[in-house]
Amino acid sequence: MTEEKKMTSRIPDFANRQEEAEFWDTHDFGDYWDETEPVDVTFSKNLSANLTVRLSPQVLKQLRQQADHIGVGPSTLARMWIVKHLKDTHESRQREEA
């Protein structure tokens, strides 16, 4: 989308995902085709490698708020934290063994 097109967009800038969801609940995406552009999407073939983690409602709410704040989904943020923790733990163990 060009800068000129962004300036004349009928789609508002959203403060958060909730605001965006409420907008699209009451508007038809088909009315905005001229303001969209194609994207490439790839789907994972091996969906059986998933892990389910249960969180309390309070923790899930905090996770969603933090994820929304940085602009990613809660699953993505949880994966980022887990990967970072595993890396930090691995590096710590390597230092202890040295």
Image: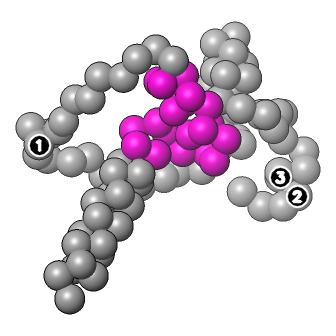
Mark yes or no: residue 24 visible.
no
Which residue occupies the foreground of this view, 16 or 79? Answer: 79
**Quarter occupied by the N terminus:** bottom right
Counting every numbered tag in the picture gives 3
Q: Amino acid at mark 1?
A: Ala
Q: On the rendered structure, is 45 left or right of 9?
A: left
Q: Which residue is mark 1?
A: 49
Closer to us: mark 1 or mark 2? Answer: 1
Q: Is residue 55 above or below residue 48?
A: above
Looking at the image, tell me whether mark 1 or mark 3 is earlier in sequence order. Answer: 3
Snapshot quadrant of residue 14: top right
Question: Mark 2–mark 3 contact, CB under 8 Å?
Answer: yes
Which residue occupies the foreground of this view, 32 or 75? Answer: 75
Q: On the rendered structure, is 41 left or right of 61?
A: left
Give the image location of residue 64, x and y in percent.
54, 30
Snapshot quadrant of residue 84: bottom left
Q: Amino acid at mark 3?
A: Lys
Q: Secondary structure at mark 3?
A: helix
What secondary structure do most residues of the magenta stretch adopt? helix
Snapshot quadrant of residue 17: top right
**Quarter occupied by the C terminus:** bottom left
Q: Which residue is mark 2?
A: 4
Question: Mark 1–mark 3 contact, CB under 8 Å?
Answer: no
Q: Which mark is residue 5?
A: 3
Q: Which residues are magenta?
A: 59-78
